Image (cartoon, grey):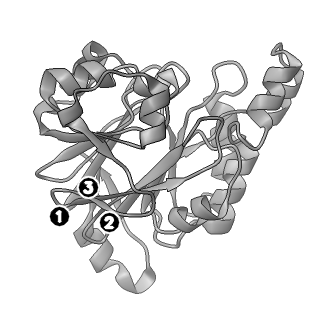
Amino acid sequence: MSLFFTSLNSGSNGNCYYIANEQEAILIDAGLSCKETEKRMEKLRLSIRKIKAIFISHEHIDHIKGVEVLSKKYSIPVYITSETLKHSRVQIPKININFITLHKAIFIGSLHITAFPKMHDAIDPSSFIIKYNDLTIGVFTDIGKVCDNVIKYFKQCHAAFLEANYDEGMLENGDYPFHLKKRISGDNGHLSNKEAFELFTRHRPAFMSHLLLSHLSKENNTPALALELFNINSDGVSVSIASRYESTQLFELKEKAIKKAAPSLSMQLTLF
C-alpha cells in the first residue's frame, strides 16, 4: 500500500497539492486555473477523474482560483469551513459543498483527512494531514507562527510540505514597504526559513523521510538559501523544493518500507 503525492504548484502565484492512494485522490487547495491544473496533471500522467475531493485551507486567491471550475466541470466535492466559504465568495454548487469540522477526520474512501486551525491573516485558516493506513502526509503552509497545533500534527508526518517563505535578511533589506514586511513576518503572516528550520529540527519525528520546502517567496527567498539551511541538519531526511513555476515529480510513500524498517523507526521514500 502506498501514498502518492506531488506539488502541482507552490507559491503566491498558486498553491495546489495532490495526494492519492491506489484508488482515490484529493487536492489540498486549488490555486491554479482549471486549465493549468489539467495540464500539469496530464504531464504527470495523473487522471483528474481520480480526484474525489478538494480541501480549501483559506480564502486567499492563490488557494481558490480554480476551485469553482474544477468543482463544476468534474462534479468534485469541496470541503471548506463555513466562514472561509462566505469570505471567498466562490460560487460552488450547493450539492458539492461540505463543511469541515476542525480536528475531526473526514473519510474520502480510504484516505483520512484532518483539518486543524493555524495562525494566518485569513478569516478561518486551516492546514491538513492526510492518513492512509500507517502513512501520514502533512501540508503546512501559510503559517504565521508555529503553534501547538502545527507541532502536534507535524510530529505525525512521514512526509510534509512545509512553508519556508522568506529569508529574514532578504525581507529586511528588500524593497517591500514597511507595513508589508511587518505583515509577512508577523504572527499571522508566513514562516521564515529560520522558523521552519526550527520546527523541523525540534519536532520532526524519527520516521520522517521527506520534506518539501513550500510557498517560497519570489522576492524574499531563493531555493538555494532555503536548501543550504536545511541540508545542514537534514539527518537523513530528503529535502527538496516545491516550485512556484512547475510541479514536482510524483513521489510514492510505501507502507511496506515502513514496516520493514520499524525497529529503527526509519522509512524509505521512492520516486514514482
The kind of residue tagged 3 is: Leu
Whether residue 138 sits left or right of residue 108 in the image: it is: right
The kind of residue tagged 1 is: Met
Is residue 167 in view from this perspective?
Answer: no
* Circle on res. 135: 2
Q: Which of the two labelled residues, at mark 2 and mark 3, occupies the earlier sequence position? A: 3
Residue nearest the observer in this picture, 238 or 13: 13
To which residue does mark 3 refer?
3
Q: Which of the two labelled residues, at mark 2 and mark 1, occupies the earlier sequence position? A: 1
- How crowded is the residue under tag 1: few (<14 C-alpha within 10 Å), some, or many (20+)? some
> Residue at image x 76%, y 44%?
187
Whether residue 27 sits left or right of residue 45 in the image: it is: right
Residue nearest the observer in this picture, 16 or 229: 16
**Measured from the top left, where is residue 266 in percent x and y?**
43, 73
Cα distance between the residues tagged 2 and 1: 9 Å
The kind of residue tagged 2 is: Leu
- SS for callout 1: loop
Is residue 45 in view from this perspective?
Answer: yes
Q: Do the CB atoms of the residues marked 2 and 1 lie less than 8 Å apart?
A: yes
Whether residue 235 sits left or right of residue 175 in the image: it is: left
Q: Residue furthest bottom?
A: 263
Res 178 quadrant in image:
top right
> Residue at image x 47%, y 68%?
156
Q: Do the CB atoms of the residues marked 2 and 3 lie less than 8 Å apart?
A: yes
Res 103 quadrant in image:
bottom left
To which residue does mark 1 refer?
1
Picture quarter with the C terminus = top left
**Residue 180 against residue 228 in the figure, above or below:** above
- How crowded is the residue under tag 2: few (<14 C-alpha within 10 Å), some, or many (20+)? some
